[in-house]
Amino acid sequence: MLIEQILPNCALHAHRVVEDQRGCLVALESEADVPFRIERVYYLFDTARGATRGFHAHRELQQWAVCVAGACTITVDDASERRTVTLDTPDKALHIGPGVWREMRDFAPGSVLMVLASQPYNEADYIRDFDEFVASRRAKPPQ
Ligand code: T46
């Protein structure tokens, strides 16, 4: 369920939580709960104190980021607007579409950031220079 459209190509969503006396469970099915075919899963953990990650955009990749333990902040920027979102619960996800610069920081100790991705790893899909990213957005505004 959509909680908030952060940017035209980036939105915060709530997961459906199955809760009983034993605790909580979230299930994420490809092309159902997650609006794309999941081709890859990776996760960030043991993040060093004060470390930052990201600082790139993707040309085509869509991602569904869930902080399954702990908390972190993600700054997203589409070259028109910059917003910062805190992920601090496993029942929320940030859907980041193509053409969005992202920076992750403020990882709480013990955090695990899990990311579901629409494509296999492909370095050619990354834009790692911010000026190049802005130029690419001016040439191709968000659809
Ligand atoms: C993103 C944010 C949220 C692989 O070999 N396979 C993979 O699937 C990934 C994601 C990375 N790698 C290698 C490539 C680099 O040598 O792992 C190394 C670290 O990757 P990177 O510096 O891109 O990591 P982050 O945390 O800055 O960015 C990652 C994702 O790469 C990126 O797509 O959106 O998390």
Image: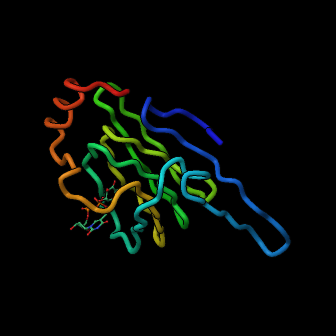
In the figure, 90 relative to 76: above or below? below
Name the colour scheme.
rainbow
In the figure, 52 relative to 141: above or below? below
- Please indicate whether residue 46 sits to the left or right of residue 67 in the image: left
Q: Quadrant of residue 54?
A: bottom left
Give how far across and how far down residue 48 sits, in percent: 33, 70
Give how far across and how far down residue 89 sits, in percent: 60, 57
- The residue that appears at 20% across and 37% down in the rendered structure is 133
Q: Quadrant of residue 105?
A: bottom left
Near-viewer residue (31 or 86): 31
In the figure, 83 relative to 80: above or below? below
- Please indicate whether residue 15 sits to the left or right of residue 133 in the image: right
Quadrant where the N terminus sits is: top right
In the figure, 116 relative to 142: above or below? below
Q: Residue furthest right?
A: 21
- Please indicate whether residue 138 sits to the left or right of residue 6 in the image: left
Give how far across and how far down residue 110 sits, in percent: 48, 72
Give how far across and how far down residue 117 sits, in percent: 41, 57
- The residue that appears at 51% across and 58% down in the rendered structure is 66
The quadrant where ligand 1 appears is bottom left
Quadrant where the C terminus sits is: top left
Q: How many marks?
A: 0
- Please indicate whether residue 90 sits to the left or right of residue 136 in the image: right
- The residue that appears at 43% across and 40% down in the rendered structure is 84
Q: Quadrant of residue 3?
A: top right
- The residue that appears at 55% across and 52% down in the rendered structure is 31
